[in-house]
Image (spheres, rainbow, N blue to C red):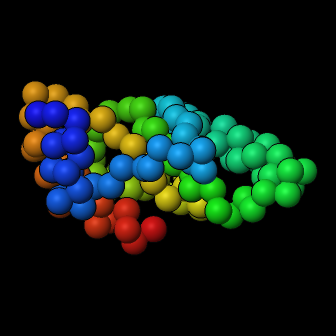
Amino acid sequence: MSCEAHVRFCERRGVRFPPATRRNLITGPGRQAASGTPAGADLVRAKLDVLRDHCQREGTDYERIEKTILYVGPPPATVPSAAAFVEEMKPYAELDVRQVVLMPFGPDPVGFVDHLASNVVPQLAGL
């Protein structure tokens, strides 16, 4: 499947891709800390604070920047793991992260995307 066909396939199932613009901040959250809080949320918060300060100095509207993260971790492959994934994403939603990028994992990328569209995207939309 070509890249363009893959994007169209995913978008028909409700999965969106971030536009490739300079207005996006993409960073990876990493793994969860022992406390149960994603270790990366603190790192993302710190990076966003730096970005906010930079925007103030440069006179740029910080709110216009689309915050996007690249998720690095086990994919939400089952309905219970989808619920856990949504819980893991809550701290990022509180930081105004509006897009999470995931790579299809395993031998069935179509099934992976269908599962995300059916079980994960609707729950994330509620954050």
- Residue 67 position (above or below residue 122): above
Report whether residue 36 is seen. no
**Splitting the image into 4 quarters, where does residue 42 fall?**
top right
The residue located at (60%, 50%) in the rendering is 23
Say whether residue 125 is left or right of residue 10. right
Q: Residue 61 placed where, x, y %? A: 75, 62
Say whether residue 18 is left or right of residue 109. right
- Residue 126 position (above or below residue 1): below
The residue located at (39%, 71%) in the rendering is 126
Say whether residue 10 is left or right of residue 22. left
Q: Quadrant of the C terminus?
A: bottom left
**Splitting the image into 4 quarters, where does residue 46 fall?**
top right
| Front residue of 67 and 37 | 67
Residue sticking out furthest to the top = 107
Q: How many marks?
A: 0
| Front residue of 49 and 89 | 49
Report whether residue 68 is seen. yes
Residue sticking out furthest to the bottom = 126
Q: Residue 81 placed where, x, y %? A: 27, 47
Residue sticking out furthest to the right = 57
| Front residue of 110 and 54 | 54
Say whether residue 50 is left or right of residue 105. right
Q: Quadrant of the N terminus?
A: top left
The residue located at (64%, 42%) in the rendering is 44
The residue located at (10%, 42%) in the rendering is 110
- Residue 125 position (above or below residue 114): below
Q: Residue 88 placed where, x, y %? A: 45, 49
Q: Residue 31 placed where, x, y %? A: 48, 32
**Splitting the image into 4 quarters, where does residue 11 fall?**
bottom left
